[in-house]
Amino acid sequence: MCSGRVDLSFVIRALSNGMDGVFIGGCHLNECHYITDGNYHALNMVLLCKKLMEHIGLNPERLKIEWLSAGEGIRFAEVMNDFGNTVKKLGPLGKGEGIDKNELKSRLEEVAKLVPYIKLVKKEKLSSRLENIEEYDGLFTSDEIDRLFREVISYYIDPGQCQACMTCAKRCPAGAVVSVKNQIHVIDQEKCIKCGTCFEACPPRFGAVTKISGGPVPPPVPEGERTIVREGKEKMGEITEVS
Amino acid sequence: MEKEPARNGGLLVNSLAGSNFGDVMVVGGGISGIQASLDLATAGFKVYLVDKAPAIGGHMAQLDKTFPTNDCSMCIESPKFVECNRHPNIEIMTYTEVDSVEGEAGDFRVTLVKKPRYVIEGKCTGCTVCVEYCPVRYPDQFNQEISKNKAIHIYFSQAIPLATYIDESCLFLKERKCAICQSVCKNNAIDFNQRAEKVEVKVGAIVLSPGFEPFDPQLRDDYGYGKFENVVTSLDYERLLCATGPYEGEILRPSDKKHPRKIAWIQCVGSRQVIPGGNSYCSAVCCTYTQKQVILTKDHDAEAQCTIFHNDIRSHGKDFERFYQRAEKLPGIRFVRSCVSIGREIPESKNVTVRYSTPGDGVKEEEFDMVVLSVGLNPPAGMKGLADKLGIHLNAHGFCRTNPVNPMETSRPGIFISGAFQGPMDIPEAVVTASGAGSLCGQLLGYRRGNLAKERIYPPERDVSGEEPRVGVYVCHCGANIGRVVNVPSAVEYSLTLPNVVHAEESLFICSADAAQQIANTIREKGLNRVVVAACTPRTHEPLFRDTLREAGINQYFFDMANIREHCSWVHSKEKEEATQKAKEIIRMSVARALHLDPLRELDLPVNKAALVVGGGLAGMTCALSIAGQRHEVHLVEKDAELGGMARRIHYTLEGLDVQAYLRDVIRKVYQHPLIHVYTGATITEAGGYVGNFATRVKSEGRVIEIKHGAAVIATGADEYKPAEYLYGEDDRVMTQLELEGQIVRGEERVINSRSLVMIQCVGCRQEGRNYCARICCSQSVKNALKLKEINPKVDVYILFRDMRTYGFKEEYYREAASKDVRFIRYDPHDKPWVEAVEEGGRRVLRVTVTDPVLGKKLEIDADALALAAAVVPSADRKEIAGLFKVSLGPDGFFQEAHVKLRPVDFGAEGIYLCGTAHYPKHIPEAVSQAYGAAGRALTLLSHDTVMASGSVCEVNESKCMGCEACISACTYGAIEFHDTRQGKKAGINPVLCKGDGLCNAKCPTGAISLKHYTDEEILSQIDAAG
């Protein structure tokens, strides 16, 4: 296992569990024990996560990544002591920042829920390779993260367009599309990971899935009112073919 | 020798003793001996690894970092120790020396003397309680006697065997006093009655890898070593740099234990000196190790001022030139080209003065806080006597006299050598020759491969899929290491309160043989299906416990290790209560993870027994012959119409080998070998498959055929640079060294009878765009200069050079050339020589203008011919080959090995190996060594019927995959491929290519990919249990 295996969701989970600091140790850059140089990926994740922490009001110094080799016992001890002191100075998570406990919980939940979406939209940057320490600050900017949250995408199935062909439901990796034969499909926003697969999958001639950026998602059609009224048999045939 | 399987330092030693009968004895347990042992043992031979030191590791274990990557030396070497220790076909015999060798190849009788260590290896667990109580403090050999150790101690902390030994300073041995160690040892491992013991072992072949001895400057009083406190050797300095060294990685000078600010390095100490007490050869590694020490010194102390007094800078290895530049560019670093002498010690400060001279300023004397002597490499100590016992010949320097075309062969059949006993060399060369010597043993002993090799047999695995998790927790005292800090009984009690824990107990040494048996029994009796061991580090001990699980009949992946020693007791020794609390938390996390563990299968893949060798030059042919000589079919693919490669243009070597005669012989052997299939004029159109199962399509003579093979060797060679400078191509009197060689051999009047001939070095390399040294050109120019002088002593030969890089024994020929009036003129790369065609007094000449740095003025040389030392450049088809076989190229376009130091002929992609100039420019004997090395490595694969792939690899849940491709860019192993399904594009993972780093898992937005054994569920449960 490589430091690049450390998932953004692991850090968020640790913070959600009330951990006051998270430390990630990796091999020195360019001394990869695999051939993948995954520690660069770990670095990118940490830089992103720090910005996410800032966004929700947490001090990004609570997260630290450091490159250490197995031969650097003394340095490791120093690094850990330093980090321990830093975290102690910052105080308990949230309290040090003056955020209400419940408020922090809901903010972290919001981030945790967006992890898949964040991984997807920041896919390229998360794989980039920063050779100089000077570049670290610029990889993710606060503006960018604010915008990410402001313009977060939601997907919504237009009840007027949906033909209940079930294509999106079959393709959804999160099992978030409520799909019953001949009933208008509905995206369970709680389960949805905002990957956009349904948007891509919906046959263009229906165009039922819409992308909403930042705005609220219209409420779903109540369960009893989802049955689709077909216009004619001809069309039905066509739909069957599609599915 | 112990006759029973024993546990050593907690690791199972699969003692093969009892029969005293093996296949190969490897003498010398440094990195070269270790590599030879591992290769041979893996290839099915029973190996005795003999070392005179109390632990294996050799000099590499003493180094802090290794150039040019600055990898931590111990971190990369110690896993090899553990591998040797656990290998069922290796018997390690430390503290043992060879007494005599009788018999012949295939049937040697070796008498060994096992020195008494006064500690029963099989009983010692390495807990070091005895060391704490020992009252004697004695200079620590491993730390170059800079610090003190106890009379009973472990050689170094990662030692294998991890057992103490008692040295001559022991009070009991000297005066029958003390014996405290005996009373504190809880395992009764101390035995003062041990005596030196003679052991006879029968083997079929012997590999000698005794390494080298650092030059001892004390033998010469002009360096002040041993006289002035602050003069140290480079090996002393290596220990000072090292975190496990005398001052835990702080560079302190001997006189006052203060940080030296101003440090001087003196190069060529004991090397390149034709004076009594010196060595005439170049030690080949000192330039680069000094640069490493300078870089590390600056890492330790950014303010340090480092001065390197040097002769030629010899950066002839792969990536050495860049490394040199890296050192040179650091602030506060001076490289001063000058002869030096140590002046005096300043009485008050104990500083040392160094006298040197520079062309501008004349002689100067400068004061330094500390002086490091970059000592050279001497032949291994006591080799003269041993050589007589072994019946092998040494060369004039005391190194082994080897076969000129096969540096691993000695004068006695069946005895091979590897490593620095051949002559000064760096670690990768020591590793290459080790694999090469292994291959030669394989050729000799192929008929008995596998006869003595052992494999362990395990009971069938219990299916626990329907069971609730039943966890057993074992908490180790580790002697006192854990027990005196962590309250172990309380941790055991706590473990019993954790969900699904049905058994918990404590153990004094959970790694001992009895304890392992106890675990196995409890697994069976209490029906445990998960085991957590709270003890030390999985790095050394996880394989042992996994093995215990297998022996008890449950899947080995149902194991988790809670490290409460390194992560807890050792670092919190003063906070016992908190440490106990932390230990409990670590155990809780481990148990939480254990509940989610899945049984995993290690994949057994069949191995196709044939090999493909790409490239029919000397390296490719030699490799093919060695593999075929071990009864494997070889397909040899050459792009040209004829075999021979670059060697077809080389006629003689510096050492006097008739290359063409040798080449003809090799080609004949290749064509005559029944197991080698040669394809000439061939191109590879497709290459697919994976380790053990490759399929390559080759187009040759108008046909395309598919070759199935288990291993592949890339030996595609290199090209000669076509110069664009110095009138090359415009004036036919300007030629490359290879062209000159051809003309000399053909007896071209114009060259042979020229009055004057100039050679210019470093044409097309050591410059922007080709930032490397082509390694061979200096020797090549000296070779042709000597040849010309031999034919026509009257010809004036001038060699214009930047640094003469005639490393190793080649230095002799450089000196010979100088003595024969070949004139060497250094030029500055910023002021390169200038060549113009002119007429002078009716004679048409090439006028070469160069600035002589010694005289400080411009010289004009009128030459009849000009030979350019044109660089060796990567072969034109390298990108195509790299793409086909999915292997990588380095920054200079040469193929990139898996690890610069320890896997120099392997590629990152398994089952593919590398040799010859495709790797980097090299001389013929070096290419031959590497060819045997690649063959040896290939045999570690081909000698098996199946190859095992780890169970901890990634897998894809297709229904969750959205086809976003975030994973594929992260996987440089090429293990991920996409395929179309009715539900769109989906990722698929080839478990054979996956190495389990888990990057893709972290990239996957939908959770479709998971790394088995480190799944999100397993890790998140651990995180949840932490809080």
Image (spheres, rainbow, N blue to C red):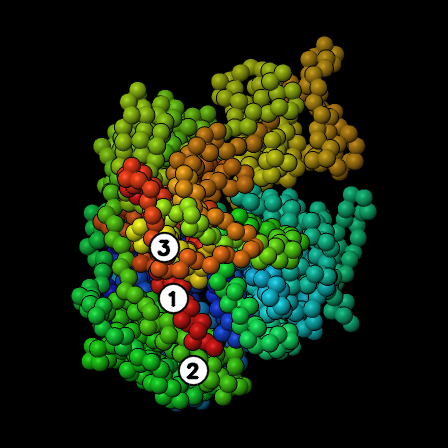
Marks 1 and 3: CB-CB under 8 Å? Answer: no
- Residue A226 - label: 3
Residue B253 is left or right of residue B192, and the answer is right
- Residue B1017 - label: 1
Q: For mark 3, name the chain.
A: A
Whether residue A94 is visible, yes or no, is yes
Question: Residue at 78% of width from left, 43% of height from top?
Answer: B359
Of B372 and B680, the residue lying toward us: B680
Question: Which amino acid, mark 1?
Answer: Glu
Q: Where is B1021 relative to B219, above or below?
A: below
Residue found at the far top of this picture: B842
Q: Quadrant of the N terminus of chain B?
A: bottom left
- Residue identifier under label 2: B584
- Residue B522 - label: none
Label 3: which secondary element:
loop
Question: Which amino acid, mark 2?
Answer: Lys
